[in-house]
Each structure stands twice: as structure tokens, then as C-alpha cells.
Amino acid sequence: MATAGVQVAGVTKSFGDVEVLHGVSMTVPAGGTLALLGPSGCGKTTLLRIIAGLEQADAGTVTVGHAVLTDGRRMVPPERRHVGMVFQDWALFPHLSVAANVAYGLRRLPGEEARRRVADALAMVGLSALADRAPETLSGGQQQRIALARAIAPRPAVLLLDEPFSNLDAALRGQVRTEVHQLLTKLGVTTMFVTHDQEEAFVLGDTVAVVRDGAVVQQAPPTEVYARPADAWVARFVGDANLVPGHASGLTASTALGIVPLDAERSGPVEVLIRPESLALSLDTDGSARVELVEFYGHDTVSLVRVGDEVLRVRTPGAPLAHRDERVRLTYSGPSAAVAYVRRPAAAQ
Ligand SMILES: Nc1ncnc2c1ncn2[C@@H]1O[C@H](COP(=O)(O)OP(=O)(O)OP(=O)(O)O)[C@@H](O)[C@H]1O
């Protein structure tokens, strides 16, 4: 089947008395890759399982292409959805060979066609030479590729991946992520994947849906989520964020760093989002800021710098520009206008 877009509209789901999804809506265009990003327990896996047909929604609809898979009345069974799923633990059958695992979803096809599909899927993930092996004799990265091959062999309209890299150790993750990225690009199949890792969401997703407590708080391309997070919580969740208190008046805010330009008119107390790489640091014996801690990462350095009552994270390329206790000058260095969030009195937060 040709790949197709996915539309989720107003999906709610409770387990017992607890509502874990509160009217979730999102759209993935045909061929797009959407990352469902959120902290543990926010309902990401439940949503994926509803799309796969493994869980019934209480309300709302799931549409793939023109086919309504779930609504108030009907629920198309998983095997008739044209949806491929890769589970968090890969769920491979240990007693079956690699090829037999991949053939599992093709039982209704004639033998010759099924064999051809298995060969195609294994070639696609680069495992043709290992077709007769048992999965447990292969590495974690290879096992993940078997699970992917099994999901793509029936040529699904949509691919769903649940925390695709969580079973791999840190050393393998980056490499396997790049391999999967290349594969998804080659396949061009609509993909939705669940992750709690911001980096994973940004690298693989052409759109990111940030989920918090069973609701989508923002759906946008990664660059937009990073530059213009919907609120201060999202700002912190998707990267290092300084939320600098200030007082806004129109298109500027006065802060401990001086006047910062704002991207929208505000008035009164605000928190101005300033990413660590948006601050410039220079040695200045008369500077009002002081370095409290230096962390050197090789490609860049993060310094904790005290300015008045605030301690800000500052990221500068390469080796440290200043050492602990040195006085420095800190200036806002862009983007041309910063995002600011209205600061509510503590009691209202
Ligand atoms: N079958 C179930 N019965 C009861 N509660 C459930 C069931 N499945 C999930 N939950 C609860 O629903 C909430 C959302 O779980 P879900 O697995 O969807 O979250 P998640 O964002 O994918 O988290 P994680 O990354 O930890 O898997 C959690 O509080 C979880 O305990």
C-alpha cells in the first residue's frame, strides 16, 4: 500500500478513573516523520497503541489516508490497518530465524511473494547475509534492524516506532540512529515515533509534537520548537534554557543583561528565553558578571556566570574564554528578537 498521512482528532483515553489522553489532535502529512516527545508517563505509548489498534480510544478519531480506523463506533483490527509497529523491546521471536521473523506479518501472501518481500526488507536494512541466524546471536543494532525489517516487509502505509533506541547502550545509539534516519529517508514512509529524548526527536522528526500530561502542547518543526517554545516548560524540556526575569515594555525587556529585544509586545514582568549560545562572553576586569563554574566539552564550553541575582548558562565554541572567578562581560547576542513569557505571581503558578 502507498504511504498515507495520519490524522488524530480529539482522542481521549482513560484507564479506570484516570484520563491519560485529553483530546489529543495531530496531523502527519504523507511521507512525514513525527516525533512524539514528552516525559515518561505522559501518554505517548498509549497514543501509538491507539493508532496501531492495540488499544481502544474512548473518543476521537484516527484516520490514515481516507480510511477512518477508529471513531466512536468502529475499530478496525490491527492486522487490517496497514500500520507497521516496532515495539520498545523489538518483540522478536527467539525460536525463529531472522528471515522467519521478518516473514511473520506476510503469512497471508503466496510463498514466492512472501520470500521476495523478506529478501527486499532484509536488503533494505542490510541484513541479507544473516537471514538464517537466530536473532539472539546478533548485536542490539542488528536486532533492531530485524524488527524494522519485519515492520516494513508488509509495506505499511504508516510506521510506528516506540522508543526505538531505548534498548541500545549509549555507545551504539548515535550510530544506529543515523542508520535508521538513512533508512527512513530512503523508505519515504509516514512515520510516528515516541521518545523522551529531545535530541532524538530533533534529529529524526521533521515535525515534533510535544506532549505533556496527555495533551499536545506544541506541534511544529524542530527549529521552531527550539526557537519559539510554546511556554517556559517546553523551552526547558527541549534544551538548555536561561529564563531571565525582566520587565517588558512593548518590544523590549529590561533584564540583568540590559535591554533585550522581544519578538512580540509584552508589558510587565516576563521571563525572557535566552539559550546559552545566544550570550557572548568576554573577559573584562570591570565587568559586572563573574564566572562561577566552567565545563569544557571539547567542541564547546559551558560556563555558569553570575549576573546580579541570576546564574546563567553560557555556551561558547571551543576552549574556555574565562576561568572560574574571573570577571567578564555578558551580552545578548541574538536572535534579533527573543521570546518572552508573562511571569505570573508565585501564588498563581
Ligand atoms: N493498560 C494500562 N492500564 C492502566 N494504566 C495504564 C495502562 N497503560 C498505560 N497506563 C498509564 O497511562 C499513563 C501513560 O502511559 P504511557 O505508557 O502511554 O506513557 P508514556 O509517555 O509512553 O511513558 P513511557 O515513556 O514511560 O512509556 C501512565 O500513567 C501509565 O501508567
Image (spheres, grey):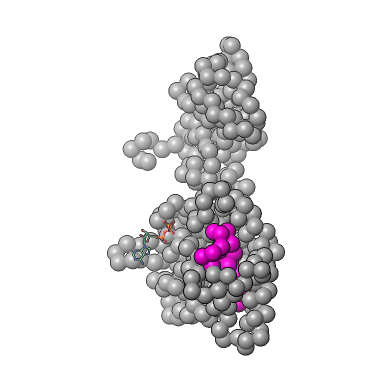
Question: Which residue is drawn at the image coordinates 51% and 26% (left, top)?
Answer: 304
Viewer-proximal residue among 215 and 1: 1
Q: Principal SS element in the magenta part?
A: helix
Q: Quadrant of the C terminus?
A: top left
Q: Position of residue 94 (x, y in %)?
A: 48, 70
Q: Quadrant of residue 326?
A: top right
Q: Which residue extends farthest top?
A: 286
Question: Which residue is drawn at the image coordinates 41% and 66% (left, top)?
Answer: 12
> Would you place residue 262 above or below residue 81 in this image?
above
Question: Which residue is drawn at the image coordinates 60% and 50% (left, top)?
Answer: 174
Q: Position of residue 235 (x, y in %)?
A: 51, 43
Q: Which residue extends farthest bottom?
A: 110
Residue range in magenta is: 135-155
> Would you place residue 161 above or below residue 100 in this image?
above
> Would you place residue 29 above or below residue 120 in this image?
above
Residue 154 on the magenta segment: yes
Viewer-proximal residue among 256 and 162: 162
Viewer-proximal residue among 220 and 148: 148
Residue 35 on the magenta segment: no
| 270 to the left or right of 317 | left
Residue 61 visible from this viewpoint: no
Q: Quadrant of residue 34?
A: bottom right
Question: Which residue is drawn at the image coordinates 47% and 38% (left, top)?
Answer: 342
| 157 to the left or right of 307 | right
Q: Quadrant of the N terminus?
A: bottom right
Image quarter where ligand 1 lies: bottom left
Q: Position of residue 77 (x, y in %)?
A: 47, 80
